[in-house]
Image: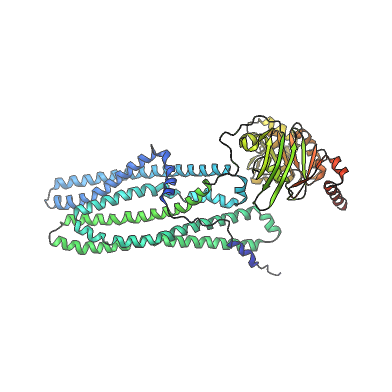
């Protein structure tokens, strides 16, 4: 059997990305905005954690002086055992106090960090749900998932330890410097001369480190997007035996994700050896110059020992501050991507004084409506039409003629780029989105079934409905029979997208969901396209009940389903060619007549 070779052109997809690096300088304004999520906890968890931090820091600053100056230069030098016992007891007490304070510090900081991550993820998810359809048209589900999960997760360490540790280390560092100058200004200045060199070298790493973490986030986004696409499209992949190409593409994306992590980690790892090298140089200076100061009597042995303790402590906060700075760089890269979404404004938004619609009649009017999805190709070209309350309206035409666009404008998923759409005389731009969409139900060709029970999926149309109302809606659309045959009836669990159900069964559930919502306007967008002829006959009977008294818009390629519509609009290239009843249009022998004849000829040929 001939081995299937991977097409090199498939790999070219790897070099394409809908996202780009966000090139902005590191700015504290954005970081302060991120740290603003701490504010709700500024009266309880934060003060408690800060108090424990200050307590442990104070202990660290006191202990070396007690050991060096008081123990060596006083208690031991004077052979005062009582003073020595007192100092040892005090040291033991301070260590126990520090141990207890650290336990509570870690506990409260973890609690604080998790609360902030929870709030941030909730805020981002809530905001994403308010964004317009165009936002989702331009981004893959995987890239959105990365922002909500991975980017926010990367901030966890920053909020759990980084912020408070940074404060603790700054206080500790300042305290050590003050004490060192108090103990010996000459020795302190000799050691501090190496700090500017370390600062210069570390500063040069910052831009590269930050950019590296941006690249990591971008690669993770691409990896997740491909995984999501591969899982969703696995049946198509297997049907066309494209597994080798898919695997080759995944391998390239996975490899670059790995390389980006390796590069970022390598740059991060350069900081600690830099600190350790500086520490080694500082220790050499301490021993060489400190010994000479002891010999000439400038400092005592106790001060030298205390100085050695403080010098050892001095490099630790610098090293940790370098790590926190790396966390800040990671947080900056992630926060840029998070705030990019949070700053995204919905193209369809409410006015401040938007009108709340009550129960509407469903009189829909389009006046000279124009629309384009990309500002290049026109989807609707100055169309005007009227749908009277209670009428059943059909929209027909070839793919891309503008049928679904009309439905999207009625639901206000998009706003027209010209003209106006009104319901019961109210311009849709002037009414609240929630009150508008409460009066509209949409049944799509590709029905989405959520994880949960059959009962929960139908009740999605009306969360307040009783179990009996759910069953009644299912009976009305002919879904009750197949539901009762399921292992647990209405309590049968269905997984994401309802894969245990047939396409027709999923569509029947969507009809029950729409009926339960009891809308004044019902939109059926190719809703019967995936249903077999026998099921369609049941649906046609159910539709008579479903459509009665509602303004109904039916989008259909299968023209047999719209014969009884009150009015049929025939669209082509975003314009209305014809309008009338089935009989009127057939007698007119125009575009509609040709479509019907062509469809019947196809059926006869079949």
Q: Nearer the viewer, residue 337 or 48?
A: 337
Indicate the position of residue 351 as horizontal and vertical percent values: 58, 37
Q: Is 35 left or right of 186, judged from the image as shown? A: right
Q: Is 603 left or right of 416, judged from the image as shown? A: right
Q: Nearer the viewer, residue 84 or 304?
A: 304
Q: How is the image coloured?
A: rainbow
Q: Check the image and report above or below for 70 versus 473.
A: below
Q: Check the image and report above or below for 534 versus 195.
A: above
Q: Nearer the viewer, residue 358 or 526?
A: 358
Q: Nearer the viewer, residue 332 or 502?
A: 332
Q: Is 201 left or right of 134, judged from the image as shown? A: left
What is the quadrant of residue 239 in the picture? bottom right
Name the residue: 67% across, 29% down: 359
Q: Is 187 left or right of 16, judged from the image as shown? A: left
Observer able to see residue 501: no
Indicate the position of residue 586 as horizontal and vertical percent values: 86, 43
């Amino acid at each position: 059997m001939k081995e299937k070779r991977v097409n090199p052109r498939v790999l070219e997809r790897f070099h394409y990305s809908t996202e780009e690096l966000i090139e902005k300088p590191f700015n504290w304004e954005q970081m302060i905005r991120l740290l603003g999520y701490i504010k709700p906890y500024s009266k309880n968890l934060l003060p408690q954690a800060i108090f424990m931090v200050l307590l442990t820091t104070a202990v660290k600053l006191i202990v070396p002086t007690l050991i060096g100056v008081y123990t060596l230069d006083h208690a031991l030098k004077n052979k005062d055992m009582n003073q020595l016992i007192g100092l040892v007891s005090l040291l033991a007490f301070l260590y126990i106090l520090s141990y207890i304070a650290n336990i509570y510090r870690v506990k409260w900081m973890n609690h604080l960090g998790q609360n902030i991550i929870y709030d941030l993820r909730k805020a981002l998810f809530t905001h994403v749900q308010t964004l317009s359809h165009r936002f989702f048209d331009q981004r893959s589900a995987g890239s959105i998932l990365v922002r909500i999960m991975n980017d926010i997760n990367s901030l966890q360490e920053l909020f759990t330890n980084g912020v408070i540790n940074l404060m603790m280390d700054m206080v500790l560092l300042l305290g050590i410097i003050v004490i060192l100058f108090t103990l010996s200004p000459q020795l302190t200045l000799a050691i501090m001369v190496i700090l500017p060199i370390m600062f210069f070298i570390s500063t040069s790493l910052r831009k590269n480190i930050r950019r590296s973490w941006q690249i990591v986030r971008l690669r993770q986004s691409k990896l997740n997007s491909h995984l999501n696409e591969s899982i969703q499209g696995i049946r198509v992949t297997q049907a066309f035996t494209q597994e080798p190409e898919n695997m080759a593409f995944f391998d390239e994306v996975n490899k670059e994700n790995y390389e980006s992590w390796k590069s970022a980690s390598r740059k991060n790892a350069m900081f600690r050896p830099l600190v350790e090298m500086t520490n080694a140089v500082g220790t050499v200076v301490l021993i060489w110059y400190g010994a000479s100061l002891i010999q000439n009597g400038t400092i005592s042995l106790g001060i030298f020992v205390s100085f050695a303790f403080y010098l050892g402590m001095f490099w630790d906060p610098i090293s940790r501050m370098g790590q926190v700075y790396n966390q800040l760089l990671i947080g900056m890269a992630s926060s840029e991507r998070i705030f990019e979404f949070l700053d995204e404004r919905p193209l369809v938004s409410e006015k401040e004084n938007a009108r709340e619609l009550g129960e509407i009649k469903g009189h829909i009017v389009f006046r000279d409506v124009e629309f384009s999805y990309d500002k290049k190709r026109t989807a609707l070209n100055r169309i005007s039409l009227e749908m009277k309350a209670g009428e059943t309206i059909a929209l027909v035409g070839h793919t891309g003629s503008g049928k679904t666009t009309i439905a999207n404008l009625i639901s206000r998923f998009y706003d027209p780029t010209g003209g106006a759409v009104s319901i019961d005389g109210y311009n849709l731009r002037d009414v609240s989105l929630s009150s508008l969409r409460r009066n509209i139900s949409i049944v799509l060709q590709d029905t989405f079934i959520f994880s949960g029970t059959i009962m929960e999926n139908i009740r999605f149309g009306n969360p307040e409905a009783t179990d009996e109302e759910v069953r009644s809606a299912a009976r009305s659309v002919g879904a009750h029979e197949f539901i009762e045959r399921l292992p647990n009836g209405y309590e049968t669990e269905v997984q994401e997208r309802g894969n245990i159900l047939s396409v027709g069964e999923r569509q029947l559930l969507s009809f029950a969901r729409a009926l339960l919502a009891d809308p004044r306007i019902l939109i059926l967008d190719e809703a019967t396209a995936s249903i077999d002829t026998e099921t369609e006959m049941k649906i046609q009977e159910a539709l008579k009940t479903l459509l009665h008294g509602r303004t109904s818009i039916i989008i259909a390629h299968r023209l047999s389903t719209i014969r009884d519509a009150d009015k049929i609009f025939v669209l082509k290239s975003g314009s209305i060619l014809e309008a009338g009843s089935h009989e009127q249009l057939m007698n007119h022998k125009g575009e509609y007549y040709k479509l019907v004849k062509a469809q019947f000829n196809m059926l006869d040929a079949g």
